[in-house]
Image (cartoon, grey):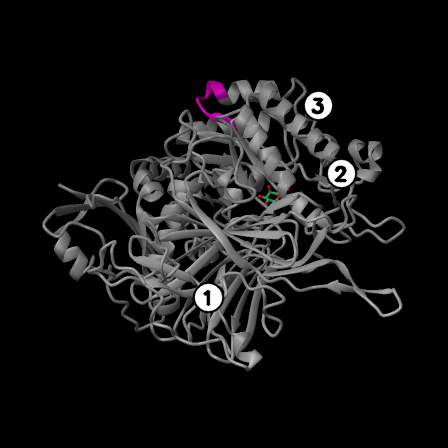
Amino acid sequence: MIHFNPDTRTFNLLLKTSYYAFQVDDADRVVHLGWGPRPDDVTDDDVISGTVAHKTYDTPWSFIAQFRPDEVLTFGDVTSHQVTLKASFPSLPVPLKDGEALHLPIRDLRLRYVDHAIVTDAQPGLAPTHGLPVKDNSPRETLRVRLKDPVQDFFVTLCYRLTPEHDILERWLELENAGQDTVSFEVCYFASLHLPAGTNELTYVSGAWAREFTSHRERLSPGTHIIDSRNLQTGHVTNPIFMVNRPGQAWEESGTVYFGALAYSGAWQIAVEQLPTWDVRVHAGYHSFDFQLDLAPGEKHITPAIVCGVSADGWGGASRRLHAFTHDRVLPRPPQGPRFRPVLYNGWEATYFNLSYEGQAELARKAAEMGVELFCVDDGWFGARRSDHAGLGDWVVRADAFPEGLEQLVREVHRLGMKFGLWVEPEMVNPDSDLYRRHPDWVLHFPGRERTEARHQLILDFGRDEVIEYIFSMLDALVERYSIAFFKWDMNRLATEPGSVVGKAIWRKHVAGVYRIMDRLRAKHPTLDIQSCSGGGGRIDLGILARTDQVWVSDNTDAFDRIGIQEGFSLAYPARCMEAWVTHEHSHITQRTTSLGLRFDVAMRGALGIGSSLNELSDAELAEYASYIAFYKRIRHVIQEGTLYRLERLEEFQASVIEYVQSDGREAVYSEAIHDYPIGSFRPAAVLKGLISSAIYTVTDRHNHEVQRATGYELMTLGLPREMTEHVGYSRTLYLQAI
Ligand code: GLA
């Protein structure tokens, strides 16, 4: 609910358990008042009036005014600290005595309140255009507050879209140049968030290829801490998510935690700034490195959104709010699509580039027999692709591998009752390819300069509309010809030498191009699913999730490493979209050996996939796989749709215990995995959440054997008894059902 008091000119945004308030002051500046949890006994009439003034910023001391928490901080009003927007206007002539004029370029922007409106159809920039519904399509209120520079014909609209049931605010900016000359931007965040003084403990993730989503928690020293991506994709090094709280005041299930996630898949930056006053600001949006945004007269720019909120129930509550929001409001849910994410087979780690019809058909038969529902052919099916040296860009089926065409395999996969999926990497080209030989000018580069390759490939210039059109037509033709139900859309390198026909705008244009192609494909083929992959988990964010169904979190499929990677992922993203494979006993990535039980128990924590070489497995092993898959299918509705609690995190007892529970509390899945087991240690039993105290639950294992029977009350107070046989790599998955 959005509340405006015309007398005090105060805005109150009221969400389920939190509030957000700001005020237009006497000088028409829009100044933040507060953001946080609401007391339990509030009603919708309890609002902040703005009469409890915290600080006065109108003093003769200009440095104090610099601390004023404007809802949008502009270079002009603020020069000593980070700003939300920095714009350059054309120079104004200053008349001199002798009739000459001095031209002074202007880098001063001040924004003052004009008017506001509450609407229900507002969309941030780069919102999906595929037209597919999400789970919850009910209208949401957006507050639009229009501001104007007192001198220039330049408007900024501050947008706040509310999803009250999940305590989520989406914030973005709309910039409008109503003047006669071009306005250029050097800094453009989607929003600056003002957090209470001392809120300086930051949780974020970092990583690299095969080590994505390692979570960190740090108490920040004064100054600015930056997490960012200087890439055309979201990046491996970190991910655009954060949580912040007062040190020692928040835990997994309690305390106030502010959180946010960007809905954008390109060069982004989140800067957490701690002022000398201890006030904390989070600025999030476009990276200002190599940034360019020019608005010609009459032009508008709508930024993507930062999705943010505040949890009164710790980091777990922050995660659950983001999960529910993504689940209900972000992930596409075409009515004809599958209710639950299907069990997938992907042969990458089984065959790599060594593809043949016979080999794939044999894998497909074994996969179907064990219960797989979607069969995906990975890299190597096209052009001269016998290794990563050649063929990218030539999306024509390899005749040596599939002499009867891919149709033969597609028919076999369909006959076996599975859907057919294909790997593509549409943004790339190997110099050794027909596409490159035809269009050497289509790649990012600076003419006459060195041009480095990675994995022997170059990036297509999505600054060119003809490239985007070409890629769309190519993918569209593949879907039609091979009845493709699923693309694994990969993106395997970072941009170096990012020369484009559109100059610095390429960072934004590339993202917009990828989104446009995905949106058009999905609009035309509403049952097509897409998995976002970027050399593992390099493109995961709320922007890509609005047009994909699942993401590949890491090429590291070692179940041990995966426990931590998936825990980091779960800070912001829901289990439903987390593709996780069971692969070989001996990991190709880490050379570690793990039991089948651990591999399944960890992979079943998301959308289960199988990536093992099925031809190397005995009949008994294949039967074991089938038994796990059958179990997963019995419990996946709880994993993919339930509420997630991290009952125990790795950081404390080197064990990860997760519970997924249905909203009515009648079913739950309990998943334990021991990463390390210090001898002599006795890990406490993890107590469950969200059950019905008075109900009696049966607790069953994958063979449907009842291992326990207890009331919800007992399970939520004493927890499930630990097994005395625990050891490094011990794991179990149990299903709880109220009887
Ligand atoms: C990337 C992906 C892998 C696989 C290979 C194929 O590394 O992350 O899963 O598809 O490309 O080349």
| Front label number (1 vs 3) | 1
| Number of on-image labels | 3
Judging by the rendered image, the residue that carries numbered circle 2 is 390
Q: Which residues are magenta?
A: 414-421
Q: Secondary structure at mark 1?
A: loop
Residue holding disc 3? 399
Q: Amino acid at mark 3?
A: Ala
Q: Against 735, is 396 above or below?
A: above
Please give left or right for residue 685 compared with residue 83 in the image: left
Can you say whether 333 is above or below 38 in the image?
above
Residue identifier under label 1? 26
Task: Indicate if the residue with disc 3 has its beta carbon within 8 Å of ligand 1.
Answer: no
Circle nearer the viewer, 2 or 1: 1
Q: Position of residue 214 (x, y in %)?
A: 49, 61
Q: Please name the residue shown 39% across and 59% down the image.
A: 9
The picture places residue 642, in percent across and down from the top left corner, at: 30, 44
